[in-house]
Amino acid sequence: MNASVAIQSLPEAANDSELIRIIDEVIDYIKSTGLSYYVGPFETTIEGDYDQLMDIVKECQHIAVRAGAPSVAAYIKVSYRPEGDVLSIETKVAKHHQ
């Protein structure tokens, strides 16, 4: 696992329930990838191969638009270590969620 990505998807939506529905579709897609992920209140973190994660980030935008968002913005954070592993989600947060 040479990368970790945090994505906050911000689709345009008519109201809060529509916003949550669209974001839930994005999260369902992330879950379907089979990669390790962590859903937080503002962003979702995903671990895996850098190139695969970049493809997932791109697809998250497409998912939101296909779900009905006329536009979508995103904040992305990337940790990448080409020659080794990045710190895992588990290492970073497990002690805070017991």
Image (tube, helix red, strand yellow):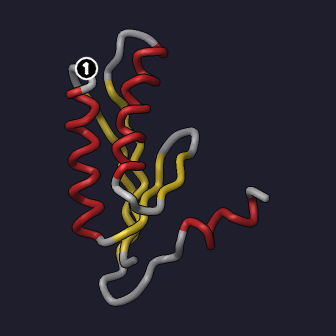
Figure check: 23 above or below 5: above
Where is residue 52? Give x, y as percent. Answer: 25, 64
Give the residue at the far top of this rendering.
Answer: 14
Q: Amino acid at mark 1?
A: Gly
Where is residue 10? Give x, y as percent. Answer: 37, 32
- Number of numbered markers: 1
Q: Is residue 49 left or right of residue 41?
A: left
Give the residue at the far bottom of this rendering.
Answer: 83
Rendered residue at 37%/33% (across/down):
25
Q: Nearer the viewer, residue 34 or 50?
A: 34
- Give the quarter of the figure containing the C terminus: bottom right
Q: Is residue 38 left or right of residue 55?
A: right
Rendered residue at 35%/16% (across/down):
13
User: Residue 96 falls in which quadrant of the image?
Assistant: bottom right
Q: Nearer the viewer, residue 49 or 77?
A: 49
Q: Nearer the viewer, residue 56 or 86?
A: 56
Q: Secondary structure at mark 1?
A: loop
Q: Residues within 10 Å of mark 1 (few under 14, many from 20)?
A: some
Figure check: 52 above or below 33: below
Where is residue 37? Give x, y as percent. Answer: 48, 57
Figure check: 81 above or below 31: below
User: Residue 59 falls in which quadrant of the image?
Assistant: top left
Where is residue 34? Give x, y as percent. Answer: 39, 59
- Give the quarter of the figure containing the N terminus: bottom left
Rendered residue at 25%/20% (across/down):
68
Q: Is residue 69 left or right of residue 91?
A: left
Q: Which residue is mark 1?
A: 68
User: Residue 60 falls in which quadrant of the image?
Assistant: top left
Q: Nearer the viewer, residue 24 or 58?
A: 24
